[in-house]
Amino acid sequence: MYPGDLHYSENHQWARVESGVATVGITHYAQEQLGEVVYIDLPNRDDEARRGEFLGTVESVKATSDINSPVSGRVIEVNTSLDDDPAQINQDPYGAGWLAKIDLSDPAEVRALMSAQEYVKHIQRLGEQKAG
């Protein structure tokens, strides 16, 4: 459910880093909390992304939520197929539902993100806080 080759932010975004480029998206947990995704507002190509800052918006039948970038750099590609089929985020959040590709300006930032195991513990703590 949470691939081990990804890095995760506290705000429920993921990053897959290959050759200095991070493919980013929202986690299974995030899409599950949102429900059916009906609209996505993505950054533009060549936009500057800053770690922890606004990258776009996802709208579902339940809510509209901001997407914060898990890394900093220049947006080099966006997943335009989501314009026509935003439900890909629900169906395949780590594959076809990716949001953007970012050319990393500071690859060391990735070390501040969580591993899959750390992220699972993070969402378990969130569940305990809601229940308690």
Image (tube, grey):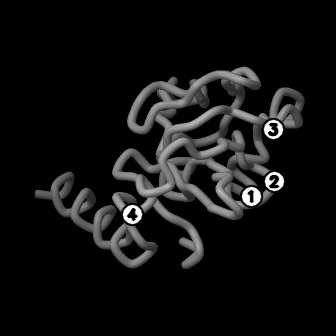
Tag 1 or tag 4, which sits nearer the N-term?
1
Instruction: First in sequence, mark 3 or 2: give its number.
Output: 3
Q: Which mark is residue 96?
A: 2
Few, some or many C-alpha atoms within 10 Å of disc 3 (few <14, some 14-19, many ≥20)?
some
Residue at the spot of label 3 = 79
Q: Nearer the viewer, residue 71 or 114?
A: 71
Label disc, if present, on residue 92 of the rendered structure? 1
Q: Closest to the observer: 18 or 29?
A: 18
Dot 4: what SS? helix
Quarter of the image for the C terminus: give it. bottom left
Q: Looking at the image, do the residues carrying marks 2 and 4 touch, with CB atoms under 8 Å apart?
A: no
Where on the picture, by quarter, is residue 118? bottom left
Q: CA distance from mark 4 to mark 3?
A: 25 Å
Q: Secondary structure at mark 3?
A: loop
Which disc number belongs to residue 111? 4
Kindly identify the amino acid type of the residue bearing the numbered disc 1. Asp
Residue at 68% of width from left, 55% of height from top?
A: 93
Q: Residues within 10 Å of mark 4 (few under 14, many from 20)?
A: few
Q: Nearer the viewer, residue 121 or 23?
A: 23
**Secondary structure of residue under mark 1:** loop
Task: Name the residue located 71 percent from the left edge and 29 percent from the top edge.
Answer: 38
Examine the image and state in which quarter residue 44 appears. top right
Kind of residue at disc 2:
Ala
